[in-house]
Image (tube, grey):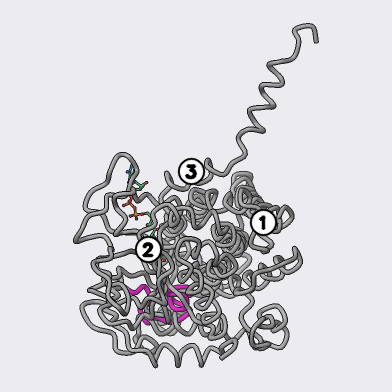
Amino acid sequence: MPARTGQQYLAGLRAQEREVWLGGERVHDVTTHPGLARGAQAVARLYDMQFDPTLRDVMTFTSPTSGEPVGRSFDTPKTRDALETRREMMLHWARATCGMMGRSPDFMNVTFAAWGAAADYFGEKRPEFGENMRRYVEYIRENDITLTHALINLQRSRNPTGMFNLEEGTALQVIRETDAGIIVRGARILATLGPLSDEIAVYSPRLARHSEDQNAFAVSFAIPCGARGLRFLCRDSFDLGRSHFDHPLSSRFEEMDCIVFFDDVLVPWERVFLLYDVARLNQAPHATHSNAHAAHQGAAKNLAKCEFVLGIALLMTQALGNAHLPHTEERIGELMLITELTRACMRAAEADSAIDQWGVMCPAIVSAECTRNLFMTAYPRMIEILQLLGSSSFLITPTEADFEGPLKPAIEQYLATDTIGARDRTKLFRLAWDVAGSTFGGRQALYERFFASDPLTRARALAAIYPKGEAMERVLAFLGQSDEE
Ligand SMILES: Cc1cc2nc3c(=O)[nH]c(=O)nc-3n(C[C@H](O)[C@H](O)[C@H](O)COP(=O)(O)OP(=O)(O)OC[C@H]3O[C@@H](n4cnc5c(N)ncnc54)[C@H](O)[C@@H]3O)c2cc1C
């Protein structure tokens, strides 16, 4: 099956029985459960965009194996133009969700596409793993499979060395091998989109901190979400079943985060990509450049999010009549700055892209990674700015029902401003609240702080790739100038 429609995606979720728990109850159908269904529909709408006649050429490309149209995010671009087209596709998806579904399927698609191109890396010691990767990437591309991933092991305590404190009975590990595959047991976090995906990938985070003697924990694989012994435990759903007027974002874009328990789960041999190989697992994102491709996807999402928050802020200040006040302009200027830095990093990553040893046009890693690191502090600051601009207006927000109740005349009289009627003002500020104040908005800020790892790991990741020599050489050259100059 080439690129899927939304209906085909939803049918795929229904067809695969999986163990998902939410609020103490087992979810029988993730596509109809009130806490998950509208998130599933949002993902379905993304897949439908692949068939929009005005977008189709950007959203899909011709499969190198079947000749059918397949999702563009599975592409491994060979030219700068193709890299930009792939980003254009990702930006369409990100804008469709206002940047609020960080784990739209393209995130994992670009990662696996990079791994497919670099399959030899996985097969260097055990050639069968390279073949597994090649076949798997073709499978997910040709079937438009939706993936979640869980990279982080739960820890019972934190180790000051920065090494993961991996313990038997908590972290995910291989407990034995059989003719059919490996058996894994343990728990991982935090599978965003877990209940709404077809497959789950397990590998290690950037700069994975496994030590050589922890190699039973070193494993990379992907299996169906319905695999026996796999259990997804959801957090509270932030979709409370209210109208789009009342909860504009949480009623649409609940992507859900899960703890994943692996209770002696069989991973068939053909789905194993690396095993016991700590060094290769740790190096995989860098050696295959999947980190650059994932960061490029993140940059598109960040840009969509910046544009959306900036747009809300501008409309808020227009509604409140404070747009011309100097401190408002200063704050709006800060939002513009973050937006343009994000856009600039994304474009620089494309402008400085180069063909890598896997034959793929690879975004420039430093520029791409910068938007991820920037966003860990910039996005919470954007939220703070919204709060400062909006103040009590976030709470002068009657519900849709109030507009139909006995207080309607009073609401309409007193909540109107010089520039906007009461209903439109309320609608705007309920949206702003879903960004800057609600549980949904709070989770978005937490997501941007942590989704790509903790701040220490992110800082180290940037330091590891930054061309430090150039900066030092300039200073040394200056120091070396003769005193007579
Ligand atoms: C909303 C959300 C969605 C996510 N989605 C996914 C997903 O889809 N897939 C996935 O794999 N992961 C996902 N993550 C998980 C993310 O990768 C982790 O949260 C992140 O790597 C941080 O790990 P942790 O939460 O265990 O933090 P912790 O290790 O609990 O860290 C807590 C704090 O302590 C600090 N700290 C921890 N250890 C040390 C130490 N040794 N020395 C000094 N300071 C330390 C950290 O810097 C941090 O500030 C998601 C996270 C969030 C918040």
Residue at the top extreme of this rendering:
484
Majority secondary structure in the magenta region = loop
Q: Is residue 369 left or right of residue 230?
A: right
Residue 277 rendering spot, x and y as whole percentages: 39, 57
* Mark 2 vs 3, N-terminal side: 2
User: In the displayed structure, would residue 51 be above or below residue 361?
Assistant: below
Residue located beneath label 2 in the image: 275
Q: Position of residue 35 (x, y in %)?
A: 35, 80
Q: Is residue 409 visible?
A: no
Give me the C-alpha separation between circle 2 and circle 3. 28 Å
> In the picture, residue 439 is in which quadrant?
bottom left
Q: Position of residue 421 (x, y in %)?
A: 58, 73
Which percent across, then down, holds residue 226? 33, 83
Q: Residue 343's mark?
A: 1
The quadrant where residue 477 appears:
top right
**In the rendered image, which residue does mark 3 sit on?**
459
As helix, strand or loop, the secondary structure at mark 1 comes to: helix
Looking at the rendered image, the quarter that the C terminus falls into is top right
For the N terminus, give its image quadrant: bottom right
**First to last magenta residue range:** 237-255
**Beta carbon at label 3 within 8 Å of ligand 1:** no
Residue depth check, mark 1 versus mark 3: number of the one nearer the observer: 3
* 426 and 175: which is toward the camera: 175
Q: Can residue 248 be found in the magenta stretch?
A: yes
Q: Amino acid at mark 3?
A: Ala
Q: Is residue 466 above or below residue 127?
A: above
Front position among marks 1 and 2: 2
Q: Is residue 150 magenta?
A: no
Amino acid type of the residue tagged 1 in the rendering: Arg
Q: CA distance from mark 1 to mark 2?
A: 38 Å
Q: Secondary structure at mark 3?
A: helix
Q: Amino acid at mark 2?
A: Leu
